[in-house]
Amino acid sequence: MSDRIEESSEKKSLNFIHAFVEEDIAENKNEGRIHTRFPPEPNGYLHIGHAKAIHIDFGTAEKYGGKCNLRFDDTNPVKEEVEYIDSIKEDIKWLGYDWEDREYYTSDYFEELYAFAVNMIKKGLAYVDDQGPEEIASQKGTPTNPGTDSPFKSRSVEENLNLFEGMKNGEFEEGSRVLRANIDMASPNMHMRDPVIYRIIHSPHHRTGDTWKIYPMYDFAHGQSDYFEGITHSLCTLEFEVHRPLYDWFIDNLMEESYRPRQIEFNRLNITYTVMSKRKLLQMVNEGLVNGWDDPRMLTISGMRRRGYTPESVKNFINSIGYTKVEAINDFSLLEFAVKEDLNKKAPRVMGVLDPLKIVITNYPEGESEEMETINNPEDESMGTRMIPFSREVYIERNDFMEDPPRKFFRLGPDREVRLKSAYIIKCHDYKKDADGTIIEVHCTYDKDTKSGGAEANRKVKGTLHWVSVPHALKAEVRIYDRLFTDPDPDGHKETDFKKFLNPDSLKVISGYVERSLANAKPLDYFQFTRLGYFNIDKESTANKLVFNRTVALRDTWKG
C-alpha cells in the first residue's frame, strides 16, 4: 500500500498526509468527512514549529472542504495562563486561519474523561498506584527487557473506585497517587507499559477553578477529545508515532460506533541557529536573555510578526520544506529567502541612511530644495510613485565614500562621480576631517543636466547611491537583528548549556535617518530600504521617535 501511496503522491504532487486523506475519502471512511484540529497547550507562545502544524491542520481542512477545530489542551493548571490562550488566537488569525465557532478546551470534557476512566476501572483496565514517579519509572524495564508489575496492579475494582473518587475529591496529597492504565508491562512499546492517565494537582484551573483535584495526562485526554469532537485525522509530529498504539488502544475501549479518528505523524520543524523548545524559550524570557516572547530575534510567531515577517512568507517557507517522515534541520537562510522573496513583491522602496556622512553640494543654491519623483516598487507598477525632497545637503552611508578607494570601488571618492538615486550625478572635490582624522563632511558639485527623468539624464556612471536630504530627514532608531545563537545547533551539545551559544551581537541599536515619507508609517508597515534590506515599524515606534526593525538584509552576510 505504501508504494501505491508514494506513486499517487508523485502523480498528484501531494504530500503524504494528503495522499492518506484522499485514500480515506475514496474509501468513504467516516462518510468522507474531513475534520482536523490544532490542539496547543496554553503554556507559552507559539513558534514557527507550531506554524507548520497550524498550516497542515487548517490547510488540510481548507483543501478538502472540511473543518478544523481549535482545542486548547488545558490539562496542567500549573503552567497554563489566559495570556497564552489570547496570544495563540492572535497568531492563528495572523497566519490567515479562522476556527469560527469551533473553539474547544480539553477541560470541556473533564466530566466525560472522568466517566471514561471510571468505566475503565470497572472493566479492570485501570488501577490506582500509590508509588511515586521514581518507583514507577524503575519498574518500566528497558526496550529489550520487560517491566515489573506494580504491587498495586491487583487491587480490586471496588478499592480502585474508592481511591480514585478520593483523588477527585482532594483527599490525597499531590504525587501520592496516580491512576494507571492496565495494559502490558511486557509490551515492546514502552508507552504501553501501564502509562499514568491521571495525576493529582491542587492548583486552581483557569476555567474550572478548584472544581477538579485530578487532571488527565495528554496521552489519555487528546485521543478521547478527538473522538468527542468527531475528528477524522489527528495530525501530529513524529515523536507521537510511538504513542499511536496507545492512542488507538484508548479509542478501542471508548468507541461505540464505526467512526474513529486516525493519527498521522509528520516531521518536526527544526531550523539552524535557534531552539524550538517552549521550555527553553520560556527560560530565556524569564532570565531576561531576550526582551519578551515577541523579541524579534525569537522564532515565536509573535516575534516574527514584530520583526516584519509576513504570513505568506511563513507559509511559503513551510511549503518549500514540505512534510515528510524524516527529521531534518533546515537552514535559517531558507526562511530568510522566503521573506525576501515575498517582500520584494510588496514592500515599498524608501531611502534610509544608517551610518550617515554629510555631503555638501557646493554649487547647489543655498536654502532651496526640489521634489524628485521616484518609483515605489519596480516589481509592481500599480504602487505608483512618490516625491522626495532634494537639497544642498544630503546624507549618504559612510562606507559609500573612501578617501583612497581601490580601482574597483565604484562609489564616491576624490574626483569620482556617482549618481544619487532619482536625483543628480555628483562629483567629489574636497572633504573635511576632525581632529581624530575621521571624515565628517564631503564637498561635491552636481551636474544640473543629469536630473533623473530629464532629457540629459542618460550620462552613465558606475555607481548609484541612496541618500536622504539633511533638512528633511527624520531621525530614527534602527534595530539590527542577527541570529540568536552562534552555533547552528545550540541544542546538539549534550554537555554544554545551550545559553553558552547566545550571540552577543544578535541585536545592535543604531541611530540613522529616513526620508520624509515615513513620518506617518504605522507599526508592522514594511519597507525595503534601498540597498540595505527589509525593515518594518516596531510597535514601540511613535510620531516623535520612529523605531525600525531590520527584518532581513538584502544579502546574506552571516559568516558563522
Image: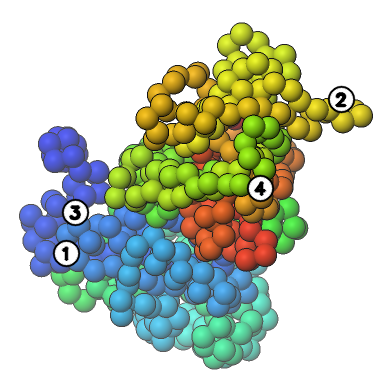
**Which mark sits nearer the N-terminus, 4 or 1?**
1
Task: Give 246 or 482, whichever is nearer the viewer.
Answer: 482
**Which residue carries the number 3 mark?**
21
Please tell me whether residue 382 is drawn above or below residue 524 in the rendered image.
above
Give amino acid for label 1.
Gly
Which is more foreground, mark 4 or mark 1? Answer: 4
**Which residue carries the number 1 mark?**
65
Please identify the quadrant where the C terminus is shown.
top right
Q: What is the CA distance from the residue labelled 3 to the residue labelled 1?
A: 12 Å
**Which mark sits nearer the N-terminus, 1 or 2?**
1
Task: Give 384 or 470, whichever is nearer the viewer.
Answer: 470
For residue 262, the mark is none
Specify the color scheme: rainbow
Q: What is the CA distance from the residue labelled 2 to the residue labelled 4?
A: 29 Å
Q: In this view, does 491 lie to the left or right of 326?
A: right
Visible residue check, residue 264: yes
**Which residue carries the number 4 mark?**
367
Q: Position of residue 352 (x, y in %)?
A: 59, 44
Give amino acid for label 4.
Gly
Give amino acid for label 2.
Gly
Q: What is the CA distance from the residue labelled 4 to the residue labelled 1?
A: 65 Å
For residue 437, the mark is 2
**Which mark sits nearer the N-terminus, 4 or 3?**
3
State if disc 1 and disc 3 touch (CB < 8 Å). Answer: no
| Helix, strand or loop status at disc 2 | loop
Residue at the spot 63% in from the left edge and 58% down from the top edge: 546
Q: What is the CA distance from the residue labelled 3 to the residue labelled 2?
A: 70 Å
Q: Label 2: how many residues lie within 10 Å, few (<14), some (14-19) or many (20+)?
A: few
